[in-house]
Image: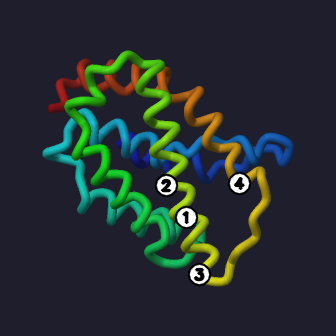
Amino acid sequence: MTFALGFVLSAIPIPEAVSNWRPSLVPLILIYWCMALPNRVGIKSAWILGMLFDVQKSFVLGQHAIGFIFLAYIIIRNHKRMRVYPLPQQAVIVLIYLLIYKSIMLSIMFLSGSFHFTWSYWLPIASSVILWPFLFLGMRLFRRRYDIS
């Protein structure tokens, strides 16, 4: 349900002035679930989400799947360590992971020939990091309220 909400929110049109600042919601939700439930949300889920995201956004098929798989792998490998960090420190780690994810996306865009780089490409990372503590707390409340484990 949360992934569906992330897909819907990423597809809603927003004004051009703030469109470059749109947070990366689907990767953030993937980070949360891989951290909270690494046995249920993992590489396979990341691949499916990435393929669906590519279809939704009309990207090269498999582009986001590769980025989401890497994101899921690194989060699952470090989920125990990441869970004990306070939210500001988690936000810094999310910043690093999103920088790596966006770098992978940029590399794939360069290799596929759809390379239209501007510095505004990195702006969603800033808004995502600012959103992370609120998303984390909201998702944790949702998970605990509906006893998702």
The residue singled out by tag 1 in the image is: 105
Q: Tag 1, which secondary structure?
A: helix
The span from disc 2 to disc 1 (Cα, nearest Å) is 6 Å
Q: Amino acid at mark 4?
A: Tyr
Query: Which class describes the residues within 10 Å of circle 4: few (<14), some (14-19), or many (20+)?
Result: few
Label 3: state its secondary structure.
Answer: helix
| Amino acid type, label 2 | Tyr
Q: CA distance from mark 4 to mark 2?
A: 12 Å
In percent of width and height, residue 8 lies at 54, 49
Label 3 vs 2, first from the N-terminus: 2
Going by the numbered disc 1, the residue's amino acid type is Met
* Spatial CA span between label 4 and label 1: 10 Å
On residue 101, the disc is 2
- The image shows residue 118, relative to residue 129, as above or below, that is below
> How far across and how far down the image is residue 53, in percent?
48, 62
Query: Residue visible at 40% across and 47% down?
Result: 3
Position of residue 61 in the picture relative to residue 41 (left or right): right
**Label 3 to label 2, Cα distance in Å?**
16 Å
Task: Name the amino acid, label 3.
Answer: Leu
**Spot occupied by residue 91 in the image (x, y as percentages of width and height):** 48, 28
Residue to which mark 3 is pinned:
111
Q: Look at the numbered disc 2 and give the secondary structure of its residue.
A: helix
